[in-house]
Image (tube, grey):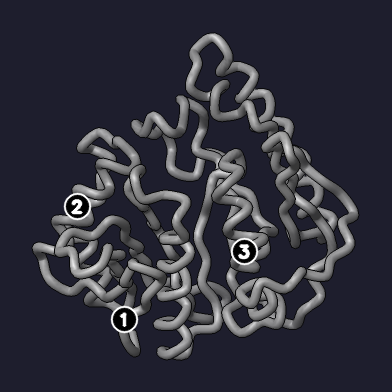
Amino acid sequence: MSGDVKAGEIQVRALTELHAFEQCVRLEEAVWGYDPADMIPRRVFLLASRIGGQVLGAFEGEGSEPVGFAMALPGFRDGHAYLHSHMVGVLPGFRNRGIARALKLAQREDALARGFELMEWTFDPLEIKNAHLNIAKLGAIVRRYKHDFYGPSSSPLQGGLPTDRVYAEWWLRSERVERALRGDALPLTAAEEVEVPAEIYAWKASEAERGRAREVQARNAAALEAAFGRGLAVVGYRCDAGGDGRFLLGQWNENSGY
């Protein structure tokens, strides 16, 4: 990174030492609640920092313990190198303060400084706040869906559902991303919409209601895959007053793509 990134009281900086990677593992456990078998160990964080990936920590003021982190690995697809952002996590008590966005901006700054045009990551399409950040606030697009990407998950956040994921593509130099980061409205014409009800979190957390969450997951998977098959992409995301989320699908017209 060219320098520390600051967001209010939060500072984001690169992590390079083993003790810092141990802190990332503790954060990982606190954020996702994984069983030990599903945890990313400190050596993988170390590896990411050594082979051209990223490990960044978010710190409150001059604190020595990070309150959030991001980890990315280098990837290669269709003849092009890119960065795959595997994990971004923030402690529960520090959420809704823009820390995840600050971590993503720091990832982008570092990626651009090293000549990358693209960052990708996967996210759960049932997670409304995360989808809104990725698409509306950061300017990512989505045009691929993967069923049960990680296999069974021990995280209670998954609610026992298959680990379906969509791929966020963050074209770092695109006009779309520049506009989103400035806070400008993204011009789009939505041909289709796919809804995620606000109740999805409660349904996932309840064994009695989990079947309803599965129905939404299956319905939305079919709708998104069909739209992608017709050449549409997720180009917008809207949250209504009741907390429901909506994927907005339309044409992705910029020349970026591989």
Give the number of the mark in front: 2 or 1: 1
**Quadrant of residue 15 in the image?**
bottom left
Residue 138, given in percent of the width and then of the height, sits at 59, 67
The residue to which callout 1 is attached is 4
Category of crowding for the residue at label 3, using alpha-carbon neighbours closer than 10 angstroms: few (below 14), some (14–19), many (at least 20): many
Residue at left 31%, top 71%? 11
**Quadrant of residue 221 in the image?**
top right
- Count every numbered label the image shows and give the total: 3
- Whether label 3 touches label 1, CB < 8 Å: no
| In this picture, residue 160 sits left or right of residue 199 | left
The mark nearer the N terminus, 2 or 1, is 1
Category of crowding for the residue at label 2, using alpha-carbon neighbours closer than 10 angstroms: few (below 14), some (14–19), many (at least 20): some
Category of crowding for the residue at label 1, using alpha-carbon neighbours closer than 10 angstroms: few (below 14), some (14–19), many (at least 20): few
* Residue type for callout 2: Pro
* Residue type for callout 3: Lys
Residue 119 marker: none
| Quadrant into which the N terminus falls | bottom left
Label 1 element class:
loop
* Residue type for callout 1: Asp
The residue to which callout 2 is attached is 41
Instruction: Judge by depth and name the residue closer to the eye, 65 or 87.
Output: 65
Is 168 situated above or below 223? below
